[in-house]
Image: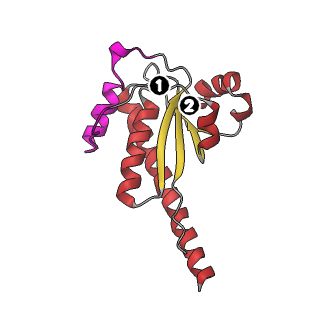
Amino acid sequence: MIVPKRIETVLFICTANYYRSRFSEYLFNALADKKGLRWQATSRGLKSWVGDDQGPVSEFTLERLATGRIHLSGDIRFPIQLTENDLVCADLVIAMKETEHRAMMTEQFSFWADCINYWDIDDIDCKPPGEALPLCEACVENLVQGLLAEQKRNARKRLKVAA
């Protein structure tokens, strides 16, 4: 009997789920698909307060994705508030900036504050998109490479066990 391989999930968290986490989600999914990585990304915000008048996602996110030839098709969703269920269901959770998000995590999801990974990517009020998004891109690319290497190691282990 062949058992289908499980798709694992990475959850990116930022404040509004409008800029950094969305960029990470879309970039990760494009790279994972291109490289055959059995992971998918989603993203959420700790304070998803962005109004409908600002649109569903940051223009800087869309511009940087287009620069990398990543084009989004279909409807683009609006920001989504993080829930505990999101944390429970994710295999890997990454918040964009520890000094910004650890306190919010502690306030909203105290159990989870020490259980997630934190990157060091500033929001737009601290670093311009031309600096922050390339850093975000490098972090996502490193994450994909690491997960891909782990996936290959696990596949080799399964082959050895089956032999």
The one nearer the camera, 53 or 68, is 53
Local crowd size for mark 2, using a 10 Å CA cut-off: few (<14), some (14–19), many (≥20): some
Asked if the residue at tag 1 contacts the one at tag 2, i.e. Cβ–Cβ closer than 8 Å, the answer is: yes
Image side of residue 41 versus residue 97, left or right: left
Q: How is the image coloured?
A: secondary structure
Q: Secondary structure at mark 2?
A: loop
Looking at this view, name the residue that lies furthest to the front.
1
Indicate the amino acid at tag 2: Lys
Instruction: Look at 42% across and 22% down and name the residue there.
Output: 124
Q: Secondary structure at mark 1?
A: loop
Instruction: Look at 54% across and 20% down and name the residue there.
Output: 47
User: Is residue 125 located in the magenta-colored stretch of the structure?
Assistant: no
Q: CA gap, disc 2 to disc 1?
A: 8 Å
Residue 123, which numbered label?
1
Residue 20 percent coordinates (x, y): 44, 31
User: Is residue 53 located in the magenta-colored stretch of the structure?
Assistant: yes
Image side of residue 80 versus residue 112, left or right: left
Work out whether 60 lies above or below 11: above
Instruction: Look at 45% across and 46% down and name the residue there.
Output: 140
Which residues fall within the magenta stretch? 50-75
Looking at this view, name the residue that lies furthest to the bottom.
163
Residue 24 percent coordinates (x, y): 43, 39
Image side of residue 27 versus residue 95, left or right: left
Residue 35 percent coordinates (x, y): 38, 60
Residue 82 percent coordinates (x, y): 56, 28
Indicate the amino acid at tag 1: Asp
Work out whether 86 lies above or below 152: above
Q: Which residue is mark 2?
A: 97
